[in-house]
Amino acid sequence: MQKDKIVAGLDIGTTKICAVVGKQNEYGKLEILGMGTAVSEGVNRGMITNIDKTVTGIAQAMQEAERQSGVDIGEVNVGIAGQHIKGSMHHGSITRSSNEDEIKVEDVNRLTNDMYRTVTPAGTKIIHVIPQDYTVDYESGIKDPVGMSGVKIEGDFQIITAHSNAINNLHRCVRKANLEIDNLMLEPIASSLAVLTAEEKEAGVALIDIGGGTTDIAIFYDNILRHTAVIPFGGNIITSDIKQGCMVMQNQAELLKTRFGHALAEEARDNEVVSIPGLRNRPPKEVSVKNLAYIIEARMEEIVELIHTELIMSGLLNRLAGGLVVTGGGAQLQGVQPLFELMTGLDTRIGYPNEHLSRGKVEDIKSPQFATAVGLVLSGFRSVDDRQNYYSEVQSQQTPDRNTKREKTEKTGSDFFRRFLDRTRDLLIDDLDNKGEY
């Protein structure tokens, strides 16, 4: 039963590793049973660079999640990200044997499965095939062809690929932590499950997931994922700028960013100063909050400009009636929302992963930095494409119907055979009685 199903999500990020365990309650909301986090020391910009350190972080996060939830986890949904992720559009088609019967879910799934055999550049592997629009017997612009009549079904698909080595390293780390990957999902797609509403996806919205190493973009329009992109800058590069600009330690720079940082320098106070402990036998260092804001603003403006350029190149900028939804750890920086609105001219909100959450004992999960982990758990209960959710329901309903029909046929056949034997026996008894031999 879906309500008894327990799903674990594992977000292996550049700054943190997060494991979340959850189940669906009777109202269809996600109930978080446990969560564990660990510092990520073996990942750089979404790519695993140290297997042992990553395995240690995974094991630490999973142990805490298992302890809180009281559940032993064997399989996890894992997110994948990084600059190596690429998306491209491809066209596919199949021909049916007859147009007399209607197009079924199996026909559409056959076309989608065929696209997984698309030839990709050497060293890459397909992780997602996302249907866009279909064409049935040269009638184009069809969103869902199931139920129509036709012989030839064509479709445009967005195919997302990742480096084979990156996928293999993920599998190796998860297996070394005594786990198996149930589903591998692109991280911005997972985040979209947690923070976007159905109305936003219908109207047109761009999800901006600002992580530690990269910034991921996912654009939805008409309830379909239309475009994905990765920008190789995230929160860590802002920390590096602060470290160099203020001449402080790395951990001090991170604390300055999270506690006193602001993405808009004009909103920072002029006379506010932060005192930082000096190194051994050295006096404390004083950092102006205004100067700190100028350093952060310069880098954030560069990131927002790259995002805006990507939105323009996608050709969907004028269709984003839902504006932007900014999530991830970088979304917690003060002034991010007005900065995006100022530079892009689009309505912007911060994406909190509480859209599908029920009240639970883990309140920290509602922070934007855990949007991907929550989305990975949600992916165990629903698909990012509403059409796929509908197809899954149809197939689950058809399966018991077929079994019932088969059982009914078998029962009817056995009943007929039993009545036939009973009738034959009665005739033989009557015949023997008439002959006086019984």
Image (spheres, helix red, strand yellow):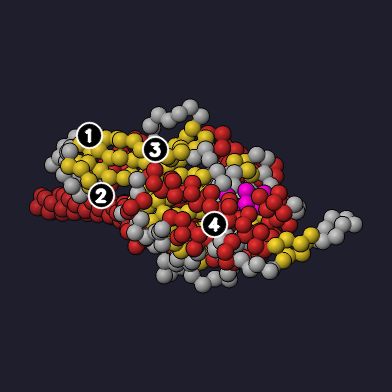
As drawn, the label of residue 144 is: 2
Q: Quadrant of residue 255?
A: bottom right
Proximity of marks 4 and 2: CB atoms separated by less than 8 Å = no
Q: What residue type is labelled 4?
A: Gly
| N-terminal-most mark, 1 or 2 | 1
Residue at image coords 69%, 51%:
245
Is residue 318 in view? yes
Q: Which of 362 and 216 is in front in this view?
A: 216
Is label 1 in a helix, a strand or a loop? strand
Mark 2 Cα shell of 10 Å, populated few (<14), some (14-19), many (≥20):
some
Mark 3 or 2, closer to the camera: 3
Residue 120: x and y in percent read 43, 30
Mark 3–mark 2 Cα distance, whole angstroms, equals 21 Å
As drawn, the label of residue 95 is: 1
Which residues fall within the magenta stretch? Answer: 234-240
Please name the residue that numbered disc 4 is placed on.
328
| N-terminal-most mark, 3 or 2 | 3
Residue at image coords 34%, 59%:
321
